[in-house]
Image (cartoon, rainbow, N blue to C red):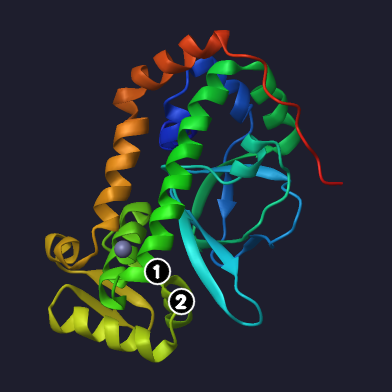
Amino acid sequence: MDATSRDHSNLLLASLPEADRLRLTGDHGPVDLTLHHVIGESGDRIRHVYFPIDGYISLIAPGGGRAQLEIGLVGNEGMLGVPLLLGVNVSPLRTLVQGAGHAWRIETAAFLAELESNAGLRAALNRYLFVFLSQLMQTATCARFHPVESRLARWLLMTRDRAHSNQFRITHEFLAYMLGVRRVGVTSAASALQRRKLIRYSRGDISVLDVRGLEAAACTCYEIDKKIYARILGRTPAKRGRVSGAARSSAAEPAPAPILYYA
Ligand SMILES: [Zn+2]
């Protein structure tokens, strides 16, 4: 993949005016996202903002002891580092690469400088922040009310979307993090989806065999997430005019609150 095609394959970056995008990404190329690399632990200072291109990053909430729950996935539809948009430079979550690939990586100081001087960028990324928070709220509802099998189907579809492939790897252990259940619960839910011929699962290798069937098996959260994203941000870079138009009209907004740092 050449640098130009990568530049357009993060949907948030692609929604920005070209000059803004080039100022953000600078003249260096994307960085590698290495499988299982831990980008940061909960409580760490945010050193970089990531805009994934063809890899994806898991957001994991600590639950005390060994308990952990994956509460989100960031792929080429989003960015890693949203606390900075709220003026906080510490991550509340553990973040690790769940799908290898590439991402644009921007140092925090450079990102904040651009954010403070560019009302259009701020407006566009605030819209993403709204989508991100909506998805977190949906996940809270999902974890409380929806059966494990439906949640597994939802999470596999989310992963498939970000992997841009019907084949990807997820360990049994990580599926347990995704769902917040014991490994035996994962085995049971994955076996049920296999019996319905929706997926094949073998030693961490997942194949989605029937996308429509898996969508029907998933809880409504999957569809709700996609609708919110499409409504607020536009589904594809082709709709970027809408986002930049909203961004331009925000030029008269009051100045942003000062950035609050935790030393
Ligand atoms: Zn759900």
Front disc: 1 or 2: 1
At mark 2, the secondary structure is loop
As rendered, which of 141 and 233 lies closer to the eye? 141
The quadrant in which the N terminus is found is top left
The x and y percentages for residue 75 are 44, 49
Q: Secondary structure at mark 1?
A: helix
Tag on residue 180?
A: 2
Q: Residues within 10 Å of mark 1 (few under 14, many from 20)?
A: some
Q: Which residue is mark 1?
A: 143
Q: Nearer the viewer, residue 76 or 5?
A: 76
| Disc 1 residue type (three-letter) | Ala
Dot 2: within a 10 Å radius of its alpha carbon, few (fewer than 14), some, or many (20 or more) residues?
some
Across and down, in percent, residue 126 comes to 52, 31
> Does residue 79 appear left or right of residue 110 in this picture?
left
Q: Are marks 1 and 2 in contact (CB under 8 Å)?
A: yes
- Ligand 1 near label 1 (Cβ, under 8 Å)? yes
Kindly indicate the quadrant of the structure image that contains residue 258. top right
In the displayed structure, 9 sits above or below 56; it is: above
User: Which residue is drawn at the image coordinates 20% and 83% (left, top)?
Assistant: 192
Q: Is residue 185 left or right of residue 4?
A: left
* Kind of residue indicated by mark 2: Gly
Residue 1 in view here? no
Measure how far apart labels 1 and 2 are at the Cα level. 8 Å
Residue 102: x and y, percent? 51, 48
Q: Earlier in the sequence, mark 1 or mark 2?
A: 1
